[in-house]
Image (cartoon, rainbow, N blue to C red):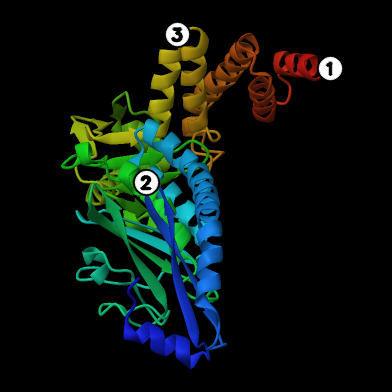
Amino acid sequence: MRYNGQVWERVKALGYRTYVCFPLELPHGLIGVLNLASRDPEADHGAVLEALGHLGPLLAATLYTVLTRLGEAGLEPLGTALRRGQATEATERFLAEVRRFSQATGARIVGRGGRRAELGWIPPCGMRDCPAWRGQVVGLKTGLPDCPEAEGRPRICLPLWAHGEVVAVGTLFHARLPKPPTAPAAPVLWLSRLAVPLLFPKEAEGKEAPELEVYALGGFRVRYRGRELGPRDFGRRGAYQLFKFLLANKDRAIYLEELAETFFPELPPERARQEVYTLVYRLRKTLPGIVEREGAYYRLHLPEKRFLDFEHFEALMRRADLEEGLSAFKTLREALELYKGPLFGDDPYGEWAEAERAYLQERALSGLLRLGELAEALGYREAAEEAYARALRLEPFLEEARARLLALRG
């Protein structure tokens, strides 16, 4: 195995005089390298290599099995999001798994097309001419070759491969460097090897991610053209609230006077209308084209390429209504994974959303009861218990769920 002079000099500086690199190979290829060093210049290379010849294949197989199982566990939440068509959420789940594997303070992924996602705090970086784009593992203040674009705090930059090319670059930042500083790179590269081809599928090249993504079940998050938006991005909090109101009434035109009475009940009518005009202006500035005016009415104009979790939840529930057996069970599970709580859970006292909130919760409750029944019929006892228990968390006085759960546990 070849190694450069810099490696030798670093090994010598630590007091080591004998150094062995042993390839860990399986029939389908090389999966790693075992490095051993000794301060004894007379150490017997032959005996070490003979022992590794016997132990190496077993160690390689064990390492491959452990890493593959870790990778499969990490891919489960990512695969769930991709099956629902949520590319952005899948990327975020991948970053969450990367942070868990590496214990990083922050993680970033940047695709060649400019697609970018971050989780946790991570130092800024241009990422334009990083050597990682050319397949090199680089960093800053970590013992790896330095990235010429990086400055300031330590980090590791990793090339992420799919379909024979680097499709993205991942960056890891640790507020407190692990020992050794490069330790997180190996498990993250292994997970990336399994996950990145799913996140950047070849057949999807040229396809655009949803222009608008809204996650309103259990909270409220908005992403527009890949960028997360918060209340401050809307200029005025009222514009942020107006967007929620229009989402809750996305299938109908809303009279100007209704908006004025809802948002500014204490103001004189003319002043209230002027305030509504200002909120609409702010909303349009943040989300161009999102509101249409038809005379004295306003209507939400959603882009064709969109993902609204509550809209997708309803579509899946309607599909499940037409299915039976295992197909219905799978569709219901997919739908109910989207239901993370009441509509606009960050604003539980908004009366303007109460009707839609109650309707969606009722759909979730009926879906959980049917999911439990299907699970029982299919012999999935644990899944049935989980469905009934979750229904009771949503509605503690739902006697049907309580009775079925007691029967299963009795």
The residue that appears at 52% across and 16% down in the rendered structure is: 329
The residue that appears at 30% across and 29% down in the rendered structure is: 255
Q: Is mark 3 on a helix, strand or loop?
A: loop
Above or below, comparing residue 355 to residue 322 in the picture: below
Nearest to N terminus: mark 1 or mark 3: 3
What's the residue type where badge 3 is placed? Glu
- Mark 3 residue crowding within 10 angstroms, few (<14) / some (14–19) / many (20+): some
Nearest to N terminus: mark 2 or mark 3: 2
Q: Mark 3 points at which residue?
A: 323
Residue 172: percent from left, percent from top: 42, 66
The count of marks equals 3
Residue 252: percent from left, percent from top: 31, 23
Label number found at residue 410: 1
Q: Is mark 1 on a helix, strand or loop?
A: loop
Residue 364: percent from left, percent from top: 55, 22
Q: Report the front residue among 48 and 112.
A: 48
Quarter of the image with the C terminus is top right
Q: Report the front residue among 224 and 406.
A: 406
Label number found at residue 28: 2
Q: What element carries label 2?
A: loop
Between the residue at mark 2 and the residue at mark 3, the CA separation in whole angstroms equals 43 Å
The residue that appears at 22% across and 35% down in the rendered structure is: 303
The answer to which quarter of the image holds residue 377 is top right
Quarter of the image with the N terminus is bottom left
Residue 334: percent from left, percent from top: 47, 26
